Image (tube, helix red, strand yellow):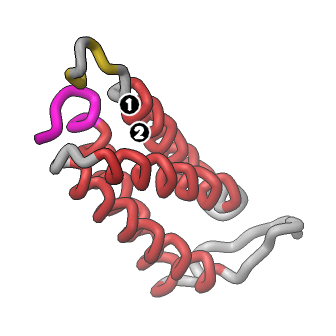
Amino acid sequence: MATGWTVFAAVLMFFGGVMAVLQGITAIAKDNLIVVTHNYAYTFNVTSWGWIHLILGALIAVAGLALFTGATWARFVGIAVAGLGMIANFLWLPYYPFWAILLIFIDVAVIWALCAGMTRRAGREY
């Protein structure tokens, strides 16, 4: 059973994953709505970004749900997918900056909470 920082990270991961799924659906369905005015070195078309965010968001949400079990593997998977989410949203900045910055902050908070919850005192996790 998860407690403390792990529950906090699980809730944030699920919320952030759902937001990323919505971001992906929007980019796939309304790819002509989002327009970039500059050429960037890491430019994909918006539909490609939509699929990346949709798949990554689903993985983040599932990892967030797995964190509620309190399993150690779920903590490491959570750190990994939150890191991938940060990278994807950093690359998404030219397309939708406010949404990307919000999800980057959520991913940073998740990684911090998962790492802070790893401290052990007297063989017990806090």
Along the line of sight, the residue nearer the viewer: 9 or 98: 9
Residue 51 vertical position relative to residue 62 in the rendered view, above or below: below
Residue 24 x/y as whole percent? 47, 74
Q: Which residues are magenta?
A: 1-8
Residue kind at label 2, given as amino acid type:
Val
Q: Which residue is mark 2?
A: 110
Label 2, label 1: how many angstroms apart (C-alpha)?
5 Å
User: Which residue is found at the position 24% from the left and 20% from the top?
Assistant: 123
User: Which residue is found at the position 50% from the left and 84% from the top?
Assistant: 28
Residue 116 x/y as whole percent? 40, 24
The residue carrying pointer 2 sits among few (fewer than 14), some (14 to 19) or many (20 or more) residues within 10 Å by Cα, namely: many
Instruction: Verify CB contact (< 8 Å) between mark 2 and mark 1.
Output: yes
Q: Residue furthest top?
A: 122
Residue 87 x/y as whole percent? 64, 55
Q: Residue furthest front?
A: 123
Circle number at residue 9: none
Circle number at residue 113: 1
Along the line of sight, the residue nearer the viewer: 52 or 7: 7
Horizontally, residue 11 falls left or right of residue 24, namely left
Residue 16 vertical position relative to residue 117 in the rendered view, above or below: below
Residue 83 x/y as whole percent? 56, 50
Which image quarter holds the C terminus?
top left
The residue carrying pointer 1 sits among few (fewer than 14), some (14 to 19) or many (20 or more) residues within 10 Å by Cα, namely: many
